Image (cartoon, helix red, strand yellow):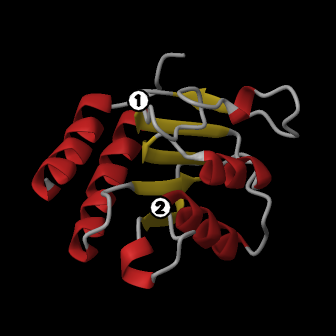
Amino acid sequence: MSPRREHLEWMGRALRLAEHSLDSGDVPVGALVVDSAGRVLGEGYNERELTGDPTAHAEVLALRRAASALGRWRLEGATLVVTLEPCLMCAGAALAARVDTIVYGAHDDKAGACGSVWDLPRDRAALHHPEVYAGIRAPEAAAQLRDFFTSRR
């Protein structure tokens, strides 16, 4: 599917959020949840190293904060925007939250669950099937990750 103009803008915000992960030495991944009117409901970036919490992925944190802001777990009408293709846990969380759309930047050929390794949103057995927009500003998202891993070697 072709990205909408706002997907490009939202991804820019997610890319800026990802930079915060670097402060704690975590993989730079940023995410936000946006409602149908374009308002940001929740944001997050990887905080696993900072918190010692294996579930503190950017997507999970953004979904939690969006649900908290709305006072409910169902995020119908919302879009999850993330710089890296969600893993199985994060894709599952997005489906459980009933987001309408998932927008992601770089593909994850090792753990991606929105088409690369698994395809949870399109799995016939899944209880919810959000639209997926892949590869949005992928060169920028991939470069951010590549730079991080290159600096670690």
Crowdedness of circle 1 by 10 Å Cα count: few (<14), some, many (20+)? few
**Which disc, if any, is residue 91?**
none
The quarter of the rendered structure image containing the N terminus is top right
Residue at left offset 42%, top offset 32%: 107
Q: Is residue 22 left or right of residue 46?
A: left
> The residue under label 2 is which amino acid type?
Ala
Find residue 9 and report its horizontal and vertical position in percent. 35, 41
Q: Is residue 120 left or right of residue 51?
A: right
Query: In this orientation, does residue 30 appear?
Result: yes
Find residue 12 and report its horizontal and vertical position in percent. 30, 45
Q: Residue furthest bottom?
A: 51
Label 2 sits on residue: 58
Residue at left offset 37%, top offset 81%: 50
Of label 2 and label 1, which has the lower sequence position? 1
Residues at marks 2 and 1 touching, judged by CB atoms closer than 8 Å: no
Q: Secondary structure at mark 2?
A: helix
Residue 86 higher or lower than 124, as above or below? below
| Nearer to the camera, 9 or 58 | 58
Q: Is residue 98 left or right of residue 51?
A: right
Label 1 sits on residue: 5
Query: In this orientation, does residue 39 appear?
Result: no
Task: Name the image quarter holding residue 143.
Answer: top left
Which mark is nearer the camera, 2 or 1?
2
